[in-house]
Amino acid sequence: MKHPAGTPAPRSRHVPRAAGHLSPLLAVCTGYFMVILDVTAINVAVPVIGRELSASLTAVQWVTNSYTLAFAALLLTGGALGDRLGHRRIFCTGVGVFSAASAACGLAPDVVLLTLARIAEGAGAALIVPGSLALLREAYRSPAEGSRAFGLWGSMAGIAASAGPLIGGLLVNTLGWRWVFFVNVPIGALCILLVLRHVPASARRPDRSLDWPAQLALVALVTLLTTALNEAGRVGWTAPLVLGSAGLCLVACALFVLREHLARRPALPLSLLAMRSVSGGAAIGLLFNFAFYGMVFTASLYFQHARGLSALRTGLALFPAVAMSMFASALSGRLARRTGHRPLVLTGMVTGAAGLAGWAAAGQDPAYLLLLAPMMAAGFGTSFALTGTTATVMSAAPDTHTGTASALFNTTRQIGSAAGVALGGSLLASSTDFTEGIRLSLSIGAAAYLLAALLAFFCVPRAPLAAG
């Protein structure tokens, strides 16, 4: 891959010699595991948190979405800081912030302080995730090794997503919901030790600017979007707060694009967005996260509120959906070398759409066994597409902007997660029939999967990766 000027991109002199060694991968994925575990474990805990802290459904949505909001809004800054100061340093800083914030979440006496601590958690995650992909890109340089590494990275997400509801439900039923957060502290300490021991320091690029005006515009964009979707269920879709937030969100989006167009050193170069594989992959990530995490959140509320299941039994009910993630990521990583990524992303998105449409069509109060295949299809389809979408974005990005490309991809994914949770919660809150709210939310998710499949047809390369 070359720079725009045509000169080869400089390789970091810190790239490990034994690129095929698993130690850097395992060290980096420990931090990523912690981030994803927190995302899925919280879903089975939020109804209990709402009861114990006397919080409304909207307040519970903010407990979930405050994390995702900060995560999405600060990912570009995390990527730029990693490019500027070294990805290993920023990655370890993020793990430290995340662990300290998790302890604060566990100690929070009310929903307001819990929400603030969740924001700090999201800020830590925003430093972890861009660094995780950039460190893997540095450690595993060949296309074949990169495909395997990204596949295992996606599998780690699947393992964490699978373990999250079960661990969350077990902790809530035994030690209490606060231990859903306390469990992150020892994982974070282990991660820092592994990274410092097995991952060499990254090259620094002091010329990379942070572009604070663009960052502020992005924070405003994500905050206003989340506010509009979250509050709609409480005050109504036509309330001034909702319409005003939606309008200002569009203004913030326009200001962000204008700033990046005028900036001498933009945080997100528009030339990067002009790459179809990068911008298309980012949009696909937004759509499948919107569909999948919206489903997980609303399904958790459905099982606990409509069916009266405990947190642990809810975790067990959700387990087949998220367990498929682990299998699908590993399978797609292996198949990609022979088929290329486009068939896998297309297959995953169509499978996910069929799953959510199947649940939506299952009727009033369907038997759990009728929901099992739809949930598994959504989990399989999302993770089956994740590896190919990740590799598409990261392979297309120039070496000088791997952190930025990673941040862009994960920013759009987290915006999708926040939007899916917020819209699903608002549809449930505004619906007179809980089951009808679930079915409408899942129908919208199925449409999002189909739109992602259409984008994949045009944006994901057809050719398989070259053998490394």
Image: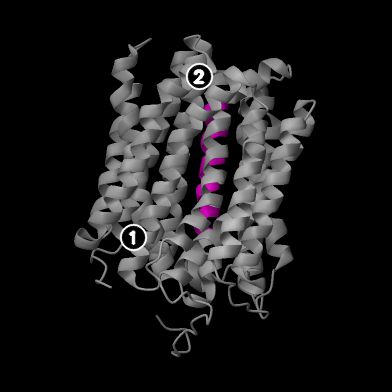
Which is nearer the eye, 361 or 201?
Answer: 201
Which of the 4 quarters of the picture holds residue 199? bottom right
Question: Is residue 180 on the magenta stretch?
Answer: no
Residue 305: horizontal and vertical position, in percent? 53, 12
Whether residue 388 is situated above or below residue 289 in the rendered picture: below
Determine whether the residue tagged by mark 1 lies in a helix, strand or loop: helix
Determine whether the residue tagged by mark 2 lies in a helix, strand or loop: helix
Q: Residues within 10 Å of mark 2 (few under 14, many from 20)?
A: many
Q: Extreme left residue here?
A: 338
Count up the numbered dots: 2
Q: Quadrant of the N terminus?
A: bottom left
Which is nearer the eye, 300 or 413?
Answer: 300
For marks 1 and 2, the one nearer the N-term is 1
What amino acid is at disc 2? Leu
Q: Magenta segment range? A: 408-425
Reading the image, the residue beneath label 2 is 312
Which of the 4 quarters of the picture holds residue 364? top left
Residue 274: horizontal and vertical position, in percent? 46, 69
Question: Rounded to the nearest whole Å, what is the CA distance between mark 1 and mark 2?
Answer: 34 Å
Reading the image, the residue beneath label 1 is 148
